[in-house]
Image (spheres, helix red, strand yellow):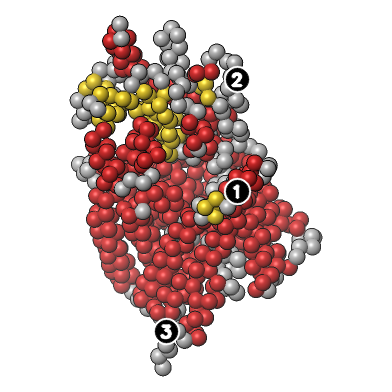
Amino acid sequence: MQHYINIIINSVFIENILLVYFLGMCSFLSISKKVETSIGLGFAVIFVLSITAPANWAINEYFLADGALAWAGLGELNLDFLQYIVFISVIAAMVQLVEMFMDRFSPSLYVNLGIFLPLITVNCSILGTSLFLVEREYGLVESTVYGFGSGLGFFLAIVSLATIRKRMRYSNVPPALRGVGMAMLLTGLISMAFLGFSGISL
Amino acid sequence: MKLGLFSSKNKKIIKDPLMGENPISIHVLGICSALAITTKIDTAIVMTIAVVAVLSISNTVISLLRNNIPNKVRIIIQMSVVASLVIIIDQILMAYMYDMSKLLGVFLGLIITNCIVLGRAEAFAMQNSPGKAFLDGIGNGLGYGTILIAVAFFREMFGFGSIYGAQIISDQMYLSGYENNGLMILSPGAFFILGLIVWAHRSYTKVIDKE
Amino acid sequence: MRSDTYTIIFTSVVTIVLGLVISFTADSLRDRQEINEALDIKKNILSVLGYNQAISVWTDDKIQSVYEKNIKEIFIDANGREIEKPIDSSLDYLKIYHKIENGSVSGYAIPISGKGLWGTMFGYFSLESDAETVKRITFYKHKETPGLGGEVDKDWFKNNFIGKKLIDEFGNLVSVEVVKGYVSSTDPYAKHKVDGISGATITGRGITTFLKEDLKKYNPYFAKIRKLNEIGSL
């Protein structure tokens, strides 16, 4: 149990997929302009990550990894070079499902997120999480926990930045620094704060 | 009328992304790898070459197919082309430049989700001829690379005291108390340097965010 | 408006073409990739057994030939007995590399791995022919922070291990400890300790732990060698 809690603490604070691994920046920068949409995107990412991580783990374990197809009598096949394309397809399919789900149950959020919902598909953090869990040789439960933790970390980071940017509206930022430049400096400060968590382990 | 290869219009396609239409500082795309791969100049250069290759080839292929792709599966087809290209480049790197492929690690695969690649496919390749799409790919790749190498230059310089592996800060400076700035190698340094470079770039090109 | 049939046909054709291109590339390059991986491992083993300076200027062929000439791969079981290369990988076995110079064994190398701060660290550890003095340590894969835990790759850290002793005066395995801070010169156990990396205590602790665990696994084998050396010197 502790091992799994460790994975979550690790992926939220110490190895935050966004603040340490820099994955998910594009949507992070564009969506963090509004707090409400950030919360919505954060939840969407948590959900998508929690389902794609175990899904991709299973596909890798039973189809793609070296010797994975032993159950079908094809143990000598190594299809791991197909990882990128299979993972991204699974992610695209899952996001499509989430879109339909959201359209049915929360149309206002669906409209607010607009183009950024399908853009979760190309959100580096989703593909990155799947690739990392393969590299770290996680099991099924570990992968799911890791996916959830990654999403949580992303959520925390994007909501933090959104709330800070809301305050920044009242500040006098030099024109050329407005937008991306300022967001980068702010994110740098947030990431520096998170660095203080390194070294913590239960 | 067939325009020459070096016509002013074509030159514009390559030059624009370097300055006023820079994918990273103006359009805010492809930021992920700009932060992750820039601890050293050599990894930044290899990444740039990979992105230029993927962008130009994927743009060309998608442009060739542009009139035949059914609208419903547009995004999936584009992504499949990009993913396949990245797989091929990854395999080639593992076979011929093994050490480099280890350094880039998962970040090579993450070119697939590099917003620039899909962004240009949608915004340019789908509406333009293969020739132009190819040039656009090269231009955007180079624009991306310029920022990448700029960030890597500062991070390596202040974080390791070297430029492209060659030690610049002399031993004497270290002995008299100079220390490498460890923060440059860690993530906050990346964010700060990129923020400052974007500030400088936007001041120069006079592009302002209307927020 | 294109018909659905067209969509399906188009998608299938694209999928098949892409699949063929990818598979063809992967297949034709696989041999080269495997050679690269194998060569990388050989480089690491040669490096930890003392060829580290020379390696940087050698060609791949030279590395291959030196390895074939001077390195012998031995498989042992949990009790330290030499066995044939196991075909069934479910059997527990350990791998040791012998450095052969002028017909006799002049060093031993073992793979080591364990948890650092950010992830699993992988490396090789070598002993002198007396099976109790440290030759070298190297890490070929880890995720430690550059400048902090990443200092394990630096010469200053690795060189501190050279000549350390793994066995105490009673013949027990004490391994090498990465201390916090510096090893005091007046410490009677200094030959079993190395300086730590400032800011990377957890990395150091991790190395201490997994190094000892791995050495324990190989101890039956090395204990036998030490015993033979004792008898031989009587």
Point out residue A8 in the picture as x, y percentages from the top left corner. Answer: 55, 37
For disc 1, the marked residue is B170
Q: Secondary structure at mark 1?
A: loop
Res C184 label: 2
Image label count:
3
Point out residue C160 in the picture as x, y percentages from the top left corner. Answer: 50, 28
Residue at mark 1 to residue at mark 2: CA–CA distance = 31 Å
Residue at mark 3 to residue at mark 1: CA–CA distance = 47 Å
In the picture, which quadrant includes the C terminus of chain A?
A: top right
Locate residue A159 relative to residue C40 in the image: left or right.
right
Q: Chain of mark 3?
A: B
The residue under the point 65% across, 51% down is: A188
Q: Amino acid at mark 2?
A: Ser
Point out residue A52 in the picture as x, y percentages from the top left corner. Answer: 45, 48
Q: Secondary structure at mark 3?
A: loop
Q: Chain of mark 1?
A: B
Q: Nearer the viewer, residue C121 or A90?
A: C121
Point out residue A75 in the picture as x, y percentages from the top left corner. Answer: 23, 41
The residue under the point 43% across, 35% down is: C139
Residues packed near mark 3 inside 10 Å, few (<14), some (14 to 19) or many (20 plus): few
Q: Relative to A27, say whether B123 is above or below.
A: below
Res B5 label: 3
